[in-house]
Image (cartoon, rainbow, N blue to C red):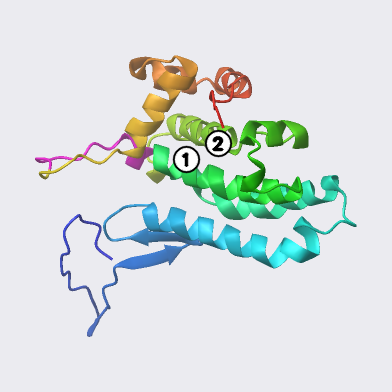
Amino acid sequence: MVLNRKKLECLLWVKEEILPQVEEFKYLRVLFTSEGRMEQEVNRRIGVASAVMRTLHWSVVVKRELSRKAKLSIYRSIFVPTLTYGHELWVMTERRRSRVQAAKMSFLRRVAGLSLRDRVRSSAIREELGVETLLLRVERSQMRWLGHLVRMPPGCLPGEVFRACPSGRRLPGRPRTRWRDYVSRLAWERLGIPPDELEEVAGEREVWASLLRLLPPRPNPG
């Protein structure tokens, strides 16, 4: 697979055989595409999580004999990991936040015995069920991974990729948001840490961990 915004043909020979070139490739259960976008993977995660909810709908989610505690245990141990697998490297646009939030609340509304017609706010349902905001968990995990990358010694491939800066002229069109730029902006918005101080602060493991523990949820009218 060739990572490029434009489709390129690359002949790769192994002995006398040409390896087939593909447009997408699944590695460690994460779907990578030749364009380098994560949109298909996020859509796939939401689809897989929705399939899990449909499978568990009658036997778990709306079953009256099960307590809410048992249903929420299933939610935390099965549904959330399925929905957010690989989320550490997602660039969370407002559209993606909204879709992930909607997928999560679809499960929780059923646990609470409600539907969209009841017009109960998402924040009220979460408070009633005692469930942490999923987007807060995602942001905390993303910035925790940032700390791991910053503290990696020289020569570690993930750290080298994180610090790499592409060379050459940018292609015309709207620039894409790199994960490094996204997480730097996230730390500035959510923790008040300027980008030029980010690596220094994140490099202190205990300090960084304490900041993430105190990370407040985003103001959410829903």
Q: Residues within 10 Å of mark 2 (few under 14, many from 20)?
A: some
Is residue 162 covered in magenta?
yes
Which region of the structure is painted magenta? 159-170
Residue with the mark numbered 1 = 97
Disc assigned to residue 89:
none
Q: Amino acid at mark 2?
A: Leu
Disc assigned to residue 135:
2
Q: Position of residue 128 (x, y in %)?
A: 76, 33
Residue 136 at least partly seen: yes
Q: Amino acid at mark 1?
A: Arg
- Mark 1 lies on a secondary structure that is helix
Note whether 172 is above or below 82 in the view shown: above
- Residue at (62, 46) in percent of width and height: 116
Circles 1 and 2: CB atoms closer than 8 Å: yes
Note whether 122 is above or below 208 in the view shown: below
Q: Is residue 208 left or right of residue 170?
A: right
- Mark 2 lies on a secondary structure that is helix
